[in-house]
Image (cartoon, rainbow, N blue to C red):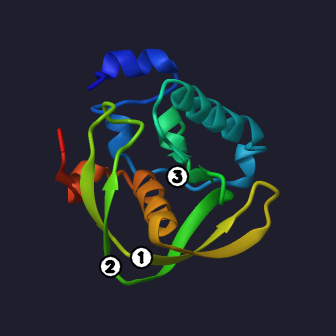
Amino acid sequence: MVDNEVLSKIHPKLVMVPDPRLRQVCAEVTKEDGDLTELVGLMVEVMEVCRGAGINTASISAPQVGVMKRVFIIFSPAVEIVAINPVITKTAGKQNTREGCLSFPKGANYLVPRPNIVKFHYQDLAGNSRTSKFHDIYAAMVMHENDHLNGILIDDNGTPLYGR
């Protein structure tokens, strides 16, 4: 397992537990926050650097790069989404997902109960209102990143799976 000091050297903006910012509720993005292109670019950069270091990731939230705003992204081969001020409007079903997190040491995995369907409203990077509905692993990703925006981490509701 890689420790926090090593992970923080992967990218200096990556916020690691036990940093108290990860337990804070993020503020809504407002017009005064301006263009979020630079923030989204930083989030993508951190994900790419982590991927290059062998860390499998498809999503990240703004507090994980030290910005306490309600923004997350999912960038995978099947889904690319920038969600600004997301609001979960409906969940259904149950699943248990094995989850890691960029803000936890590499190899730290938890079994986390999640809905297997999630519907949510958000704004995209252009400011357009959107509604999306995701199933299975993508529903879990949305919930994981939305939890970050509310100061909730995988160790709050999950069962540790270290070494399994």
Q: Are marks 1 and 2 in contact (CB under 8 Å)?
A: yes
Q: How crowded is the residue under tag 2: few (<14 C-alpha within 10 Å), some, or many (20+)?
A: few
The type of residue carrying mark 1 is Asn
Pick whichever of labels 3 and 2 is earlier in the sequence. 3
Q: Quadrant of the C terminus?
A: top left
Q: Is residue 53 left or right of residue 156?
A: right
Q: Position of residue 117 (x, y in %)?
A: 47, 79
Confirm whether residue 125 shows in the render. yes
The image quarter containing residue 67 is top right
- The kind of residue tagged 2 is Lys
**Label 3 crowd (10 A; few <14 / some 14-19 / many >=20):** some
| Residue that protrudes farthest toward the right in the picture | 126
Tell which circle, 1 or 2, labels the residue nearer the N-terminal end. Answer: 2
Query: What x and y, as percent, mark residue 123?
Result: 70, 64
Please give the residue where the numbered disc 3 appears in the rendered image: 27
* Residue corresponding to mark 2: 94
The image shows residue 121, relative to residue 33, as above or below, that is below
Q: Nearer the viewer, residue 39 or 78?
A: 78
CB contact under 8 Å: marks 3 and 2: no
